Image: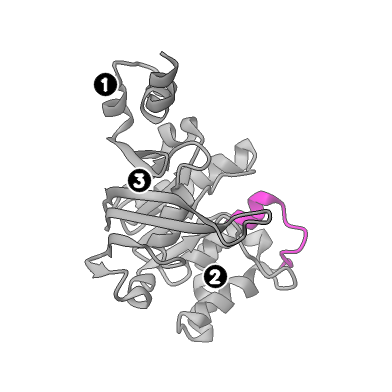
C-alpha cells in the first residue's frame, strides 16, 4: 500500500535575460493526497503539467518532497528512502535501457543491484519473460527495440526483485494497440491474487486507458488533487454518463468557471 498525504514540491527556475538575480518559484505539486491499495490499480489522471510525474518521482524517492508524507507499506519514504525503494518497482518515463546489453542482461544487471545471486537473477528473468510474453526478446540487444519491446524490458527490470508496489509513469505512451492490450493484461495479472496482489500506481493523460484499467482514479490539475474515486463515482459526482465529460468538469473547473 502507498499512502501520500499533502505532498508538495516547488522548483526554482532561474529567470532569463539580464535580470538573472531574480528566480521564479514554480509550484509543481501542491498538497496532493491519495491512498493506493494492494491488489488494485490506482491511476493519476490529468492534463500535461498537472504534476503527475513529479508526484510519482517523489513517491519513488527520485526527488525529495518539500513537505507532506509518503508511506510505502508503512515505511516513511522520506525518512527511509532506501528501505521504501526496496518495496517498489519503478518504470520511469525515460525507460533508461542499456542499448548494448540484451534484454536478459538489462534485467539480470538490475537483479544483481538488488542483491540477488546470478542463478536467481537468471531464473527470475525467465519467469518474467513468460509473464510478459517476451521470451523471444531475451537474447536480443535492446538497441533497435520497438517502443513496446522497450516497455516490456523496462517493466521486467522493475519487477525483477518481486516488489509489492509498482510505480509506472505513462506506461502506454507510444505503444500501439496490441502492445497496449498486452501490457494491460500483464498489469491486471500482477494485481490479481495469483499475481501476488500488487499495488500499482500509474500516471496517464489518456482517459480511455484509465477508464479501462484503473480501480481508483486520482484526478490532478494545477498540481493538486481535485477528485478521487472510481470511474463510476466520478461520473456520478459530476452528473455525467461519459467519463471524458466528467474528467473535463473536474480537471478544468477553473478554466470553465473563468469562461462562464
Across and down, in percent, residue 24 comes to 51, 53
Is 46 situated left or right of 78 in this image?
right
Local crowd size for mark 2, using a 10 Å CA cut-off: few (<14), some (14–19), many (≥20): many
Q: Nearer the viewer, mark 3 or mark 2?
A: 3
**Is 147 included in the stretch rendered in magenta?**
yes
Question: Residue at the location (54% across, 67% down)?
Answer: 157
Please give the count of numbered marks on the rendered protein: 3
Which quadrant holds residue 87?
Answer: bottom left
- Residues drawn in magenta: 140-151
Find disc 1 in the rendering and name its residue. 236
| Vertical order, 9 against 178 (above or below) | below
Local crowd size for mark 1, using a 10 Å CA cut-off: few (<14), some (14–19), many (≥20): some
Which is more toward the observer, 246 or 209? 246
Q: CA distance from mark 2 to mark 1?
A: 44 Å
User: What secondary structure is marked by label 1?
Assistant: helix
User: What secondary structure is marked by label 3?
Assistant: strand
Q: CA distance from mark 1 to mark 3?
A: 19 Å
User: What secondary structure is marked by label 2?
Assistant: helix
Find disc 2 in the rendering and name its residue. 125
| Vertical order, 16 against 239 (above or below) | below
Question: Residue at the location (67% across, 61% down)?
Answer: 137
Instruction: Confirm or deny contact between disc 2 and disc 1 (CB under 8 A).
Output: no
Find disc 3 in the rendering and name its residue. 42
Across and down, in percent, residue 29 comes to 40, 50
| Residue 187 shows in the view | no
Q: Nearer the viewer, mark 2 or mark 1?
A: 1
Amino acid at each position: 500500500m502507498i499512502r501520500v498525504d499533502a505532498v508538495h514540491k516547488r522548483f526554482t527556475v532561474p529567470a532569463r535575460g539580464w535580470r538573472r538575480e531574480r528566480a521564479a518559484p514554480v509550484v509543481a505539486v501542491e498538497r496532493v493526497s491519495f491512498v493506493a491499495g494492494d491488489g488494485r490499480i490506482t491511476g493519476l489522471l490529468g492534463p500535461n503539467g498537472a504534476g503527475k510525474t513529479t508526484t510519482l518521482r517523489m513517491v519513488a524517492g527520485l526527488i525529495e518532497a518539500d513537505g507532506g508524507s509518503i508511506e510505502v507499506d508503512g515505511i516513511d519514504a522520506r525518512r527511509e528512502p532506501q528501505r521504501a525503494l526496496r518495496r517498489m518497482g519503478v518504470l520511469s518515463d525515460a525507460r533508461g535501457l542499456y542499448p548494448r546489453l540484451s534484454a536478459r542482461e538489462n534485467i539480470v544487471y538490475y537483479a544483481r543491484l538488488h542483491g540477488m545471486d546470478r542463478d536467481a537473477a537468471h531464473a527470475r528473468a525467465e519467469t518474467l519473460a513468460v509473464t510478459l510474453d517476451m521470451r523471444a526478446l531475451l537474447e536480443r540487444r535492446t538497441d533497435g527495440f520497438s517502443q513496446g519491446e522497450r516497455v516490456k524490458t523496462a517493466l521486467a527490470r522493475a519487477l525483477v526483485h518481486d516488489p509489492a508496489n509498482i510505480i509506472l509513469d505513462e506506461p502506454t505512451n507510444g505503444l500501439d494497440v496490441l502492445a497496449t492490450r498486452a501490457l494491460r493484461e500483464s498489469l491486471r495479472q500482477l494485481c490479481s491474487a495469483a499475481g501476488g496482489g500488487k499495488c500499482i500506481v500509474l500516471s496517464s493523460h489518456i482517459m480511455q486507458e484509465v477508464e479501462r484499467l484503473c480501480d481508483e482514479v486520482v484526478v490532478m490539475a494545477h498540481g493538486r488533487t481535485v477528485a478521487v474515486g472510481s470511474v463510476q463515482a466520478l461520473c456520478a459526482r459530476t452528473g455525467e454518463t461519459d467519463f471524458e465529460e466528467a474528467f473535463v468538469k473536474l480537471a478544468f473547473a477553473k478554466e470553465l468557471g473563468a469562461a462562464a
